[in-house]
């Protein structure tokens, strides 16, 4: 299993031979991104949807997103697109599944996070604030991709709340470094202060993590 972070909330994941791209923002270097079978979009905001029309065409990938994303993609000429709803699960093949879970992001019409089940269980929250419903995911997540910027989404303190609720094995901070000055070190400090013991993997842009 491989994970590559391309900055902001954009990740490439390969699990069981299925290649998934998540939230390609407008400034992501598409030349760095390899083959893609599916593109998951958490919500309609440009910093998560931005490169969808181009990458869907160049990679021949199927786009998956909630209704606002589905309608935008259709309007932008994307023909291979699937709508997904809260708690709906889609089979991606090879025993890999993706489940949408509604998130707390009031400025979006329909924000979701994605629980990807393959060799590991990965949860990409998209943009979200802390919420009691995260406790329902406790024990279901191996790798948590969590925003820390505090710009219309969780800051380091709220991210620590979410981590404490879910109790993942590994945390990968995101949503910083491109449009935000937040730092993952502040998240680590917050976790230490609360005695929340979890592996925090701080990734460099373009870095590949093999698990």
Image (tube, rainbow, N blue to C red):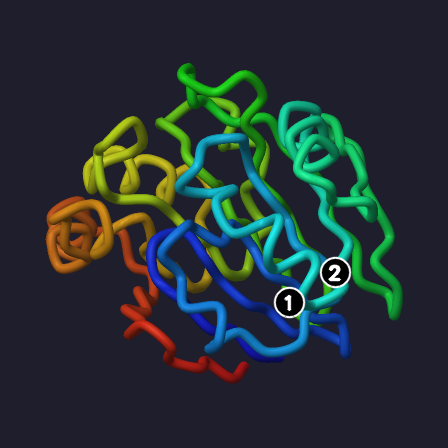
* Side (left or right) of 182 relative to 133: left
Residue name at image x 53 percent, y 74 percent: 33
Report the number of numbered marks: 2
Q: Is residue 184 above or below residue 16?
A: above
Q: Label 1 neighbourhood size at 10 Å, few (<14), some (14-19), many (20+)?
A: some
In the figure, residue 159 lies in which quadrant? Answer: top left
* Side (left or right) of 92 relative to 187: right
Measuring from the top left, give residue 10's x and y in whole percent.
45, 57
Taking depth in this image into account, of 17 and 137 the one nearest to the observer is 17
The tag on residue 61 is 2
Q: Label 2 neighbourhood size at 10 Å, few (<14), some (14-19), many (20+)?
A: many
Q: What residue sits right under mark 1 in the picture?
A: 120
Measuring from the top left, give residue 50's x and y in whole percent.
48, 45
Q: Is residue 193 above or below residue 199?
A: above
Q: Nearer the viewer, mark 2 or mark 1?
A: 2
Measuring from the top left, give residue 156's x and y in whole percent.
20, 42
Quarter holding the N terminus is bottom right
Q: For mark 2, give the secondary structure.
A: loop
Q: For mark 1, give the secondary structure.
A: loop
Residue name at image x 37 percent, y 61 percent: 172
Residue name at image x 49 percent, y 54 percent: 24
* Side (left or right) of 43 relative to 46: right
Measuring from the top left, give residue 118's x and y in whole percent.
73, 66
Q: CA distance from mark 2 to mark 1?
A: 22 Å
Residue name at image x 70 percent, y 24 percent: 67
* Disc 2 to disc 1: CB gap under 8 Å: no
Tell me which numbered mark, 2 or 1, is placed earlier along the sequence: 2
In the figure, residue 200 lies in which quadrant? Answer: bottom left
The tag on residue 136 is none
Quarter holding the C terminus is bottom right
């Amino acid at each position: 299993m491989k994970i590559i972070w391309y900055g902001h909330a954009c990740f490439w994941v390969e699990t069981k031979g299925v290649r998934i791209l998540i939230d390609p923002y407008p400034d992501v270097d598409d030349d760095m991104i390899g083959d893609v079978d599916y593109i998951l979009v958490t919500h309609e905001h440009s910093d998560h949807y931005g490169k969808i029309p181009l990458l869907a065409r160049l990679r021949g990938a199927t786009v998956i997103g909630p209704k606002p994303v589905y309608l935008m993609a259709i309007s932008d000429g994307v023909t291979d697109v699937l709508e997904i709803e809260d708690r709906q699960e889609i089979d991606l093949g090879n025993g890999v599944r993706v489940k949408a879970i509604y998130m707390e992001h009031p400025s979006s019409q329909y924000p979701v996070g994605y629980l990807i089940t393959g060799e590991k269980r990965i949860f990409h929250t998209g943009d979200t604030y802390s919420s009691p419903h995260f406790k329902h995911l406790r024990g279901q997540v191996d790798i948590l991709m969590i925003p820390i910027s505090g710009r219309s989404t969780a800051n380091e303190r709220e991210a620590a709340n979410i981590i404490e609720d879910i109790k993942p094995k590994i945390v990968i901070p995101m949503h910083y470094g491109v449009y935000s000055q937040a730092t993952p070190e502040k998240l680590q400090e917050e976790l230490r202060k609360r005695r929340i013991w979890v592996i925090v993997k701080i990734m460099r842009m373009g870095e590949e993590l093999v698990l």
